Image (cartoon, rainbow, N blue to C red):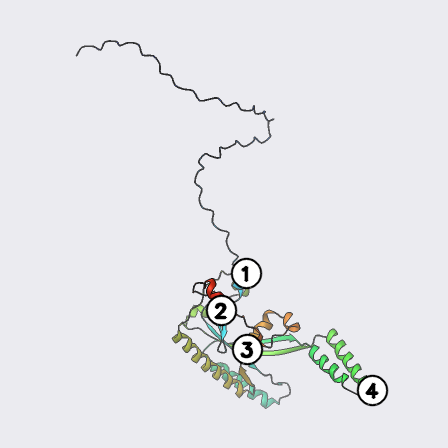
């Protein structure tokens, strides 16, 4: 193969230069001072960052700490799917009984505890008595009294009751028995009831909607009724009168328990005035303006 002949000398190609942009001189910073951050071109492509996760919700809100899901049919439905029934008991004066009567009550109480095949909770609640309605009743009677002597005596009695209620805490004791029922019959659910209050308070609980089928609900009602009958008959043998709290009475009880100060000033006695106890968003689409006008009209 013949050697290559040297060709003509090639001239360097002309490359256009970018225009030089004059920039202001950057003043030198003394040592130890933070340097200014370099300016970035807004049109330059920014690197793709990961999506910032939303701030976590507070799991310890008031709604989460409330363990009650619903109250219906004289039962309390808990968030874990279990049921509760509450029995109110009347007290008996054990100190005024004779020795033989005391022994009878003690033996009856032992037989009552031995006959139970499910756990119970005995609650003794002390609540301050509101003397306001009683004083108001006396004041109305005093206004309708024409006898001057009786008016003076009633004024002294009203002042005495008022001063006594302010200086001394007049307490009223109530006695309750709570009967639980776990549909699954899981021993772990019963063990969880023995956890401390703060362990339950700071535990994360789901806000999902509790769903119970009709068969399980009817079985729970029958089982609760059987347990209530068993407990009331055992208490009757001891001479203790008892009855199961209704749905309205359960609402008043939990209202007084969760609002000890407000319940004294604002008692919850009439449920007919509470027209919006539970509000749920409808699943159907919102009606159009025409239908709304027809309904409103």
Q: Is residue 143 left or right of residue 254?
A: right
Residue under the point 41% across and 78% down: 218
Earlier residue among tags 1 and 3? 1
Task: Give the residue pinned by disc 2.
Answer: 295
Residue 16 image position (x, y, % from top left): 41, 19
36 or 204, nearer to the observer: 36
Whether residue 175 is situated above or below residue 186 in the rendered picture: below
Q: Is residue 263 visible?
A: yes
How many angstroms separate mark 2 from mark 4 (CA)?
62 Å
Earlier residue among tags 1 and 2? 1
Q: Residue 135: name its quadrant.
A: bottom right
Residue 83 image position (x, y, % from top left): 47, 74
Mark 1 in CB contact with mark 3 (< 8 angstroms): no
Q: Is residue 193 visible?
A: no
Task: Give the residue pinned by disc 1.
Answer: 61
Badge 3 density bin: few <14, some 14–19, many ≥20, Cα 10 Å: some
How many angstroms separate mark 2 from mark 3 (CA)?
33 Å
3 or 219, nearer to the observer: 3
Badge 4 density bin: few <14, some 14–19, many ≥20, Cα 10 Å: few
How many angstroms separate mark 4 from mark 1 (CA)?
58 Å
SS at circle 4: helix
Quadrant of the frame with the N terminus: top left
Judge depth for marks 4 and 1 and give the one in front. Answer: 4
How many angstroms separate mark 1 from mark 3 (CA)?
26 Å
Mark 2 in CB contact with mark 4 (< 8 angstroms): no
Task: Give the residue pinned by disc 3.
Answer: 248
Whether residue 178 is situated above or below residue 22 in the rendered picture: below
Earlier residue among tags 4 and 1? 1
How many angstroms separate mark 1 from mark 2 (CA)?
38 Å
Numbered mark located on residue 148 in the image: 4
């Amino acid at each position: 193969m013949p050697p290559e002949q040297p060709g003509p000398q090639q001239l360097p190609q002309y490359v256009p230069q970018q225009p030089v942009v004059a920039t202001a001189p950057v003043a030198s910073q003394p040592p130890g001072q933070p340097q200014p951050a370099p300016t970035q071109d807004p049109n330059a492509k920014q690197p793709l960052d990961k999506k910032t996760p939303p701030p976590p919700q507070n799991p310890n809100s008031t709604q989460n700490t409330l363990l009650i899901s619903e109250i219906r049919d004289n039962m309390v439905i808990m968030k874990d799917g279990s049921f509760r029934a509450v029995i109110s008991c009347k007290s008996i004066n054990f100190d005024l009984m004779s020795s033989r009567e005391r022994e009878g009550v003690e033996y009856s109480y032992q037989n009552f505890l031995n006959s139970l095949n499910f756990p119970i909770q005995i609650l003794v609640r002390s609540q301050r008595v509101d003397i306001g309605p009683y004083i108001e009743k006396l004041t109305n009677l005093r206004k309708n009294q024409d006898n001057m002597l009786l008016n003076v005596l009633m004024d002294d009695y009203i002042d005495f009751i008022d001063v006594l209620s302010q200086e001394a805490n007049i307490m009223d004791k109530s006695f309750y028995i709570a009967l639980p029922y776990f549909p699954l019959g899981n021993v772990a659910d019963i063990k969880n009831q023995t956890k401390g209050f703060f362990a339950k308070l700071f535990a994360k609980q789901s806000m999902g909607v509790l769903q119970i089928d009709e068969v399980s609900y009817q079985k729970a009602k029958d089982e609760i009724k059987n347990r209530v009958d068993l407990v009331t008959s055992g208490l009757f043998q001891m001479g203790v009168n008892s009855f199961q709290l209704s749905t309205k009475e359960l609402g008043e009880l939990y209202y007084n328990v969760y609002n000890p100060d407000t319940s004294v000033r604002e008692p919850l006695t009439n449920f007919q005035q509470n027209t919006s106890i539970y509000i749920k968003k409808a699943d159907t689409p919102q009606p159009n303006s025409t239908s709304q006008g027809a309904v409103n009209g």
